[in-house]
Amino acid sequence: MKKFLFASLFFLAITGLTISCKKHKVTATNPTSDATELTVAFKPVKGDNAATKDIALTDFRKLASSKFTPKKITVTKGSQINVSGLQGSVSLSNLTLQLKTNPAIKRNLGSVAKDQVFNSAEDLAFLQKVADEMLKTKTTKLDVLTTSSDKLSADVKVVIKLNANFL
């Protein structure tokens, strides 16, 4: 009789713990996706121009506010490179984005004479390489190199919009 009572109480206790654990299931708080915008603004002068922007994993707000370090970053389709602020007949030639930590990672956008969005497969492949380098080095510098046909009094902006999934 004591064995039966003990076994019954033990069974009830285990059942109660199992049900209790299911109710209070802990979910992971690691971010799975985020977006960031990296803006490089400069006032072109006639001739060669260069501007640099520090970029880091912490530019993704969700990664900055958590202790999660992803093992992989996948750039998604909504990512793009925007060039804006060109006025009149001013154009930029050989507009090139290049990582300072790894100069082999670069993208020549060619000549730009008006506001333009770049989101081709080649552009996304470049942005994926940037994200991979950010993951590897945690912080890097992005150089914007170009030749301007004339001086501008207003800023030209190169905005990189990175939408990414984290694993």
Image: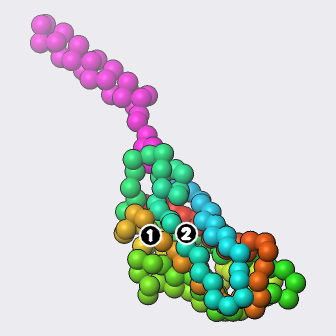
Residue 139: x %, y % from top left: 42, 65
Q: Residue at x 56, y 57 (%)?
A: 34
Residue projecting furthest to the right: 88
* Residues under numbered marks 2 and 1 in contact, where contact means CB atoms less than 8 Å apart: no
Is 4 magenta? The answer is: yes
**At label 2, which amino acid type do we have?**
Lys
Please report the residue visible at 54 percent of the width from the left and 51 percent of the height from the top.
61
Residue 54 as seen in the image, left or right of residue 89: left
Residue picked out by circle 1: 140
Q: CA distance from mark 2 to mark 1?
A: 9 Å
**Vertical arrangement, residue 91 with respect to residue 40, above or below:** below
The image quadrant that residue 89 belongs to is bottom right
Residue 43 in sight here: yes
Q: Amino acid at mark 1?
A: Thr
At 41% from the left edge and 81% from the top edge, which residue is drawn?
102
Residue, disc 2: 53
Magenta span of residues:
1-30
Which circle's residue, 2 or 1, is located before the other in the chain? 2
Is 129 contained in the magenta span?
A: no
Report which quarter residue 155 is drawn in: bottom right
Q: Residue at x 67, y 70 (%)?
A: 41
